[in-house]
Amino acid sequence: GGGGGAEEEELTAQETALYDRQIRVWGVDAQKRLSKAHVLVCGVNGTTIEFCKNIVLAGVGSLSLMDDHIVTEDDLNSNFLIPHDESVYGGKSRAEVCCESLKDFNPMVRVAVAKGDPSLIDGTFIDRFDIIVLSRASLKTKLFINDNCRKRSKHIAFYSVDCKDSCGEIFVDLQNHSYLQKKPGGEPEQQELKYPSLQVWKFNLNFFCRFVEIKSFSSCALLFCTPSLFAPRIRFV
Amino acid sequence: PSRAAKVLMVGAGGIGCELLKTLALSGFSDIHVIDLDTIEVSNLNRQFLFRKSHVGQSKAHVARDAILKFRPNINIESHHANVKDAQFNVDFFKQFNVVLNGLDNLDARRHVNRLCLAAEVPLVESGTTGFLGQVTVHVKGKTECYECQPKPIPKSYPVCTITSTPSKFVHCIVWAKELLFAKLFGDKNQDNDLNVHSKDGSSSKLDVFERDVDEDLDQYAQRIYDHVFGYNIEVALENEETWKNRRRPNPVYIRDTLPEAVKQNGSSWDCSNDHEEPSAMASLGLTNPQEIWTLAENSRVLLEAFKLFFEKREKEIGNLVFDKDDQLAVEFVTAAANIRAHSFGIPLHSLFEAKGVAGNIVHAVATTNAIIAGLIVIEAIKVLQDDYKNYRMTYCLEHPTKKLLLMPVEPFEPNPSCYVCSETPLLLDVNTKVTKLKEVIDKIIKSKLGMNLPLVMIGSTLVFEDGDGLEEDEAANYALNLEKVLAELPAPVINGTKLTVEDFQQELSCSINIKHREEFDEEKEPDGMVLSGWSAPVEKQINSNGENKSAASSSSARATDDTVEDPSKPGMKRKLDELLETKENCDASSSAQVVEDDDDCTMLDGNPALIKKKRLQ
């Protein structure tokens, strides 16, 4: 079963053994919070599966995949989660096939398919998530979902990513984000970041966004680093 | 065209798994992989080509199989072997268009560097530790080789710090691991700096650590405890000089820390299930490895672990070497280090933290490896396209400076005084009248110069050769030479003599000019010889990760540095220049100049006009 909603406070011996090396990076607290977190990924492609791999290996509570497109030969090119076996992927959606592969990466994480269309999901549906990652969506859909994330009483983090040829783009909205910044030789300092919504950002291009030049590189490992939501001690701009 | 390239990957671990995946997705179809390791549970948080069911199997083979599942038509040849093996000679390397390293130790990296130079094959090097990482490009004649810049060597501590005046937790760990644990459970014939003499001359025993015939296990354990934590400290306190400017340690005795234990003889603790791995923590009901135990708890763990070794693992005693995956050994060392730390006023640490220090564990996450693997492929493609103006050394930072996560820097030109890729003679200060050839070979030629199977010549006289295929009489002759002092070798080595040393496999040859010197400073020059004229490695904040331990005496105890004192805390503070002298895995060039770039953008293949080429002084 998944780690989400676990009653026990301490990590199990199994978790400690598996996550040893990363706990030494971000600490036990972050690991525990990670194990209670729920993530939704809309749009399964080369970019987002890289993220899915990383977040599942890290031990997130649950991961839901939304992508009803049926797997085609094109998908085989940039998706290492799809085995070259038509008997496995034939007639199935991208979400379904990748879900099965991802479960293998970490049996302690609950990976599931969420059927539906991102442009139609409602507020109550997204309430069960802490993070939503969107890819290859229209601007309208991005605005719609980002707006919904901001409207809910619980802060839902919003990421929108796209990669095309050798360029990549990511938009991040963590709303009001507080974290601890380590000062050299001193006590960690509490910091606050106020992220603009996509709506606001669109009209104010001075805010930071990153364009990363990637030559002939289809999957975008660079854009998905540590989930900054879980480890407030680590600031990842 | 780059897709037709033949690529060699050395290492199928953290970086290797990500790299193999990325290479496959990028269209590479002819790949060789070498890795000597087998899969462990702690690998599975990032080495995603492996599953729990693969634990114990070869990384190279399993990685290959996993990739073929989504790229069945590419050619991958996997070698479960050590890259230093003779089969991977210059001819082997010559068949590749580029070599990509995903290694975790300096020794292998140097070896591969030399083979790449000899074979004239470009090398893309890399390393990661936690959130830090870097990728560097090495092309013979065009850029520095991997060894042009000094690489930090693992930190070692002076004997007296370990045996008498520890001031950091790591010193206590080294003491617990290399002295106490080794003395009690390791090879009895090994030299050991622990004081073995007892309080009163009345004891007929030469060695207090020897168990008396029929001595009760509890009593034996407590006796050792009192000896190392009580008596030995009292002896040390007698030397006033030592403590003039230092905090005096407190002796610790069992009667004070565990008064009830003294009265009870015979085990009254819960016996652990015979079928499970014996564990003191389990016996005592301690469940949280992150918890810092009290002095009393540490003492209980120590005694219990001690007893469990003798009760359940008696056969291994005398042969045990500390292994970070040996739970009982880790418990023992943690407890012993903590008790010692308590004596010396050093903060105690949890088992989790102690294990990291004692086991030289490198912290690691999947994401950094994924980033680095991506960068490796980008550089590899540039190399294959001979796009040398755009080669970059890229550093992946933990705390972005000027909002740059990735810092690209132009490679330096080759170092003209690099003894590996240029032809520079070295200078060795040594006492030729008392130093044996064996010592020079071990401490200098194999250790500092990193040669694997060296050959030593004086003029045209071959005085030593290493490797298989030696005739019996040749081997006997060399064995004799090893024991001779330099001045008495068949071709005498005296002031001004020039030695030629070669490693045939690495195709590395260098000259060492000898300078005779009588006196050497014991503290500063503990080897009794000094090599100069090469870029001497800087002994800085290093984590010696899985370093093959040299045959160095127990006095130069190798250990991690205090930067891993807090391994559970993320993001250890690093300034950019600290970054460059840091963890072994992360071998960054120590004098790389940072590009000051005011843009908010991270351009990986930045405008070369912006980045000025930096030359060496």
Image: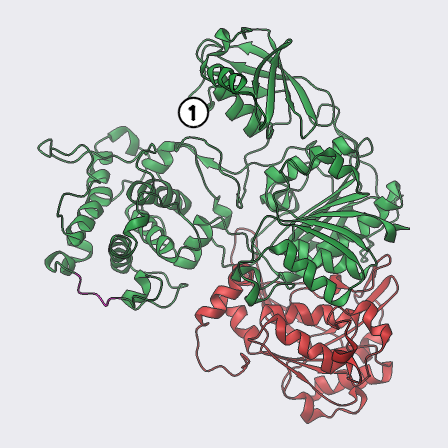
Chain colours: A red, B green
The residue lying furthest to the left in this view is: B202
Q: Amino acid at mark 1?
A: Glu
Q: Residues within 10 Å of mark 1 (few under 14, many from 20)?
A: few
Q: Which residues lie in the magenta part?
A: B267-271
The residue lying furthest to the right in this view is: B1
Does residue A102 lie above or below B506 as drawn? Answer: below
Instruction: List x then y, in percent, for residue A96.
Output: 72, 82
Which secondary structure dominates the residues rendered in magenta? loop
Instruction: List x then y, in percent, for residue B169.
Output: 39, 47
Name the side, left or right, on which B128 lies relative to B28.
left
Instruction: List x then y, in percent, for residue A210.
Output: 80, 63
Q: Residue at 65% across / 65% down in the picture?
A: A226
Name the side, left or right, on which B278 lies relative to B471.
left
Mark 1 residue element: loop
Does residue B90 lie above or below B343 as drawn? Answer: above
- Report which residue position mark 1 lands on: B523
Does residue B512 lie above or below A200 as drawn? Answer: above
In front here: A227 or B144?
B144
Does residue B374 lie above or below B141 as drawn? Answer: below
Toward which corner of the image does residue A181 lie, by quadrant? Answer: bottom right
Quadrant for the C terminus of chain B in the image = top right
Toward which corner of the image does residue B13 lie, by quadrant? Answer: bottom right
Q: Residue at 53% across / 7% down in the picture?
A: B490
In front here: B413 or A67?
A67
